[in-house]
């Protein structure tokens, strides 16, 4: 049914992840054309409302990342214009993008997440006052792709880490560092489709490791025992549902040697580039080619997402 509709692929945008979004959107647009859809690329700017009215699209495939695209802003505009779209709705998108509110939601739902403290720009961060010791992870509250994140192992590193995080947001999180396997669970249509393990060559799975070929090893399925693997899938789905997510998402976990699964975050619009994890999980876990995955997302999500 969607092949008879005009689909706008929303990409680019205004966030720090613009370049990644351009790659995701280009890949999605090319795949939709190859699958026989009538798709047009739309580079998102502040004139988006006017562009959408001019293009008269029937549905939107959102390939945006970061602020103004992944945080509910574009979703709200699309709902005002009564344009169906892929992925999660306004509230779930906003909750998932806001690391403080998502962590509070996880905790209220009985989902394990790293202990943390939240600070505003005008507040003083002192290691001695934290309820947990070093090392800690410092990150902006509302950024993705590991933008602005640092691991602080010594108090002498704190000042630079705070300056970096506050460069991107007026609020930051200081989290207890959790040592574990970096495992990411793919969710498609409310079903976990697999878990992949990331072995970064850098200290953690940072921006460079995510978007530079050869900077991280991907292991599918994740190297977990059968019971722990199923637990990771269960925790991933629980995190997805706790925020009210729809369509698809990628849930990032840290799995410890004692079998604890700590949820880092839920990505409501995971990357769709050649190096992105969600398409790899879909291919290896559900047998879906990139074209088939994009078709599944547009056919099942764009017709139903509201709220």
Image (cartoon, grey):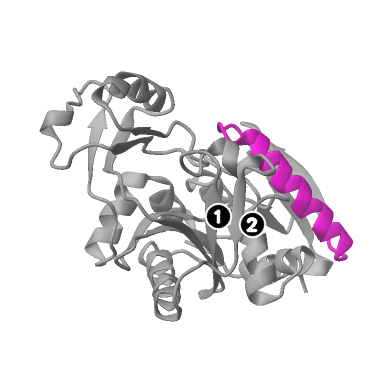
Whole-percent x and y of residue 240? 43, 65
Task: Look at 38% across and 70% down and name the residue there.
Answer: 235
Quadrant of the image occupied by residue 189: bottom right
Q: Which residue lies furthest to the bottom in this view?
A: 227
Q: Which of the 4 image quadrants contains residue 126? A: top left
Main SS of residues in magenta? helix
Q: Give the range drawn in magenta.
A: 13-37
Relative to 35, residue 69 above or below: above
In magenta stretch: residue 107:
no
Asked whether the residues under the numbered discs 1 and 2 touch, taking CB atoms below 8 Å apart as contact, a structural biologist would say yes
Residue pictured at 75% horizontal, 54% vertical: 28
- In the shown orientation, is residue 19 left or right of residue 189? right
- The mark found on residue 305 in the picture is none
* Percent x, y of residue 144: 49, 41
- Pointer 2: what residue? 83
Q: SS of the residue at dot 1?
A: helix
Q: Can residue 77 be seen in this view?
A: yes
Residue 119 is situated, as x and y percent measured from the top left of the image, at 24, 32
What distance separates the C-alpha of mark 1 from that of mark 2? 6 Å
Residue 12 appears in the figure? no
Tell me which residue sits at (77%, 50%) in the image.
27
Please name the residue shown 76% across and 57% down the image: 7
Look at the numbered disc 2 and give the secondary structure of its residue: loop
Position of the N terminus, as image quadrant, is: bottom right
Q: Where is residue 306 in the image (x, y as percent from the top left)?
A: 52, 63
Mark 1 crowdedness (10 Å alpha carbons): few <14, some 14-19, many ≥20:
some
Return the residue at label 1. 79
Q: Nearer the viewer, residue 261 or 90?
A: 261
Q: How many labels, in total? A: 2
Residue 29 lies in the magenta-colored region = yes
């Amino acid at each position: 049914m969607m092949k008879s509709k005009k689909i706008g692929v929303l990409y680019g945008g205004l966030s720090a992840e613009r370049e990644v979004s351009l790659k995701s959107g280009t890949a999605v647009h090319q795949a939709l054309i190859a699958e026989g859809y009538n798709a047009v690329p739309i580079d998102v700017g502040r004139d988006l409302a006017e562009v959408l009215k001019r293009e008269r699209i029937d549905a939107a495939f959102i390939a945006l990342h970061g602020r103004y695209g992944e945080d509910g802003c574009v979703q709200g505009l699309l709902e005002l214009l009564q344009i169906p779209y892929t992925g999660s709705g306004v509230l779930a998108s906003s909750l998932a993008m806001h690391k403080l509110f998502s962590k509070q939601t996880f905790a209220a739902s009985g989902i394990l997440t790293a202990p943390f403290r939240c600070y505003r720009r005008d507040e003083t961060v002192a290691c001695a006052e934290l309820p947990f010791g070093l090392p800690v992870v410092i990150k902006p509250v509302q950024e993705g792709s590991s933008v602005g994140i640092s691991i602080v192992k010594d108090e002498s590193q704190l000042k630079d880490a705070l300056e970096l995080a506050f460069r991107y947001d007026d609020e930051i999180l200081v989290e207890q560092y959790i040592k574990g396997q970096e495992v990411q669970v793919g969710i498609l249509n409310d079903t976990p489709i697999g878990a992949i393990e990331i072995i970064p060559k850098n200290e953690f799975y940072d921006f460079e490791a995510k978007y530079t070929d050869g900077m991280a090893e991907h292991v599918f399925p994740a190297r977990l025992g059968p019971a722990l693997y199923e637990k990771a899938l269960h925790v991933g789905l629980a995190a997805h549902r706790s925020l009210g997510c729809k369509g698809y998402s990628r849930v990032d976990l840290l799995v410890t040697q004692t079998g604890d699964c700590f949820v880092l975050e839920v990505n409501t619009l995971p990357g769709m580039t050649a190096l992105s994890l969600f398409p790899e999980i879909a291919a290896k876990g559900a047998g879906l080619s990139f074209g088939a995955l994009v078709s599944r997302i547009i056919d099942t999500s764009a017709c139903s997402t509201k709220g």
